[in-house]
Image (cartoon, coloured by chain):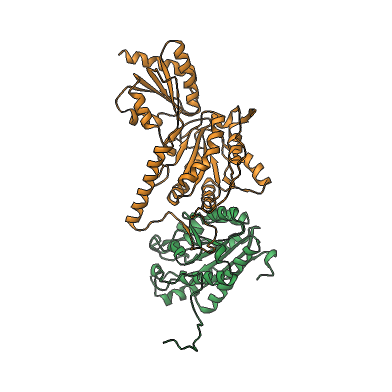
Chain colours: A orange, B green
Amino acid sequence: MTKELWKGNEALAEAALRAGLEAYFGYPITPQTELLEYLAKKMLATGRAFVQAESEVAAINMVYGAASTGARVMSSSSSPGMSLMQEGLSYIAGSQVPVVLVDIMRGGPGLGNIAPSQSDYFQLTKGGGHGDYRPIVLAPASVQEAADLMYGAFDLADKYRYIVIIAADGNIGQMMEPIEMPPQRRLEKKDRGWELTGAAGRPHRLISSIYLQSEALHQFNMHLQAKHRQIEQNEVRYEEYLLDDAEYAVVAFGSAARAAHSAVRWARAKNIRAGLFRPISLYPFPHAQLTALAQRVRALLVVEMNTGQMLEDVRLAVAERVPIQFYGVTGGLVPFADDVLPEIEKLTRLDNGAS
Amino acid sequence: MLNEHMQTVFDYPDALTPGVTHYCPGCTHGIIHRLIAETIDELGIREKTIGVAPVGCSVFIYNYLDTDFAEAAHGRAPAMATGIKRTLPDRIVFTYQGDGDLAAIGTAEIIHAAARGENLTVIFANNAIYGMTGGQMAPTTLPGMRTTSSPSGRDVEVQGWPLKMSELLAQMPGASYIARRSVHDPGNINKTKKAIKTAFQVQLHQAGFAMVEVLSSCPTNWNVSPKDALTFIKEQMLPYYPLGDYKIGDAIKTLV
């Protein structure tokens, strides 16, 4: 298949359509808007459900309604809009309907700015809304990976009747790269026993997150936890680069990992045995893999476009086994390889007790 | 003992589940539920109807109506209903909402559902108070009315004016049918039934947004007897919330 040049936001939209997207509800916000615009053009022309809602609050609740009918449905937004969607996400998790979201992350807190950031890691991976739930969060580091993750996201959401969030930063959303777009899929609709379609020849169904009795709610929460354990067992995704003989490992996701990738290559040219560990699934976090990695390397460097949000998960996995250093920039600043290389070099000095 | 010559002249509608509701004595939610169930039976739409329940006293409406149901977040029923209707346009989708749900926390959602002309039926029970949380001031609490959060009576200079949702939504070109009714006596219950039926027929004709506001009682939180609560609707609520048809769009003139 030939490669085509695609902008990240539009590649995500097209990949969703090819995966069988039936309904989209969203609200314009930079740097995500091209995704909504692309779907407006394609879906309205083909009679598929597309609504530009009055707010992200309304959009996520429209998604909730459409998901309750078993439709392949998604929304997309950026950080402040994701904050507004947290109420709906909590209800969606509590009702166990499959939903896919895209977050093209920008700088926070508050209005922050529209430049690329990884500031939503805490909000996305720890739950975000009220209650004990955690969406599946996948972080692409290229336009190709964004399209591929998007293409598989609906099946993943269906498999667990849960939320899947593609967490890309503004770089991935805005940049253009040559990619192979996956083929159009044909979907066969069949009743899965829970969706609302009208109670024709069957008892009525209810999509709800309410459990008034304490024991019942506790049991439901235990069910969600069992689902989390399954997800943690089956859906961990990560990429390793030059880690086989590495003494120093950089841990980074999304576009921060691209700068780290180059820096690792440069470090190798300087005879520093560096490697890169790139979590693709931020939840489930590749906890066990990092624990194992910490047993083989001398020190770790975490690089993020925030002030150290994934860093906390790395610390949990690594415990006190090896020193962990952090390099982070915010506000739309992007780490470059020549920023990261000196940080890797510091690891070697740290190792010699010179820090 | 049943005589073989006896006829059943009054029974549960098919769309109403038999049993006891959780509503307080004298509450009129039960009457409105029954009117919806009768309408669903008469139109023969039970098997293609999907309801969206609110947050508030009627949160458990799905236990009483025998149709598919979704339980929305507080105020978001019109958005959730939009998502359902847009993916299943041939189903009949309705929301049932109280005044806190529809006229306070969900004001944006109801206005924009009407503005888009969504093919939805909305049944809006207005009893001028928050029932489930125990009698606080609602967006529709009357001027001077005592509640637990307006203990000296609603002072409009400090706590603002009650919203007239039927009047407000009737201005929308997307709103096809907007009516206010009351259930304080049998004559008005019959009129309410007719309006609810019309609001579902509007959707069957895909004629846009339809809402029936029903003035409803809350003896428990109004601190009056069930009988006095009906009098309160008649004497206190009707002057501020006049009954009538606020919008009958051209497309539905033959239905009404």
Quarter holding residue A147:
top right
In-image side of A72 versus A108 (left or right): right
The answer to whether one can see residue B161 in this image is no
Q: Nearer the viewer, residue B36 or B129?
A: B36
How many discs mark residues in the rendered view? 0
Snapshot quadrant of residue A326: top left
Q: Write down the quadrant of residue A37 in the picture.
A: top right
Vertical arrangement, residue A339 with respect to residue B63, above or below: above
Question: Foreground: A62 or B49?
Answer: B49
Q: Nearer the viewer, residue A17 or A45?
A: A17
Q: Is residue A94 above or below residue A4?
A: below
Q: Residue B193's spot in the image, x, y percent?
A: 56, 73
Please state the horizontal and vertical placement of residue B242, each as a whole percent of the image. Answer: 56, 70
Instruction: State left or right for residue A124 relative to residue B214.
Output: left
Query: Dividing the image into 4 quarters, which one contains the C terminus of chain A?
Result: top left
Q: Residue furthest top?
A: A270
Residue B115 visible here: yes
In the rendered view of the protein, which quadrant contains the N terminus of chain A? Answer: top right
Q: Position of residue B179 (x, y in %)?
A: 59, 67
Residue B99 x, y percent position in the rendering:
49, 61
Is A335 in front, or is A10? A10
Q: Who's the residue at 63% across and 64% down the image?
A: B204
Report the residue at 70% width, 64% height from top.
B250
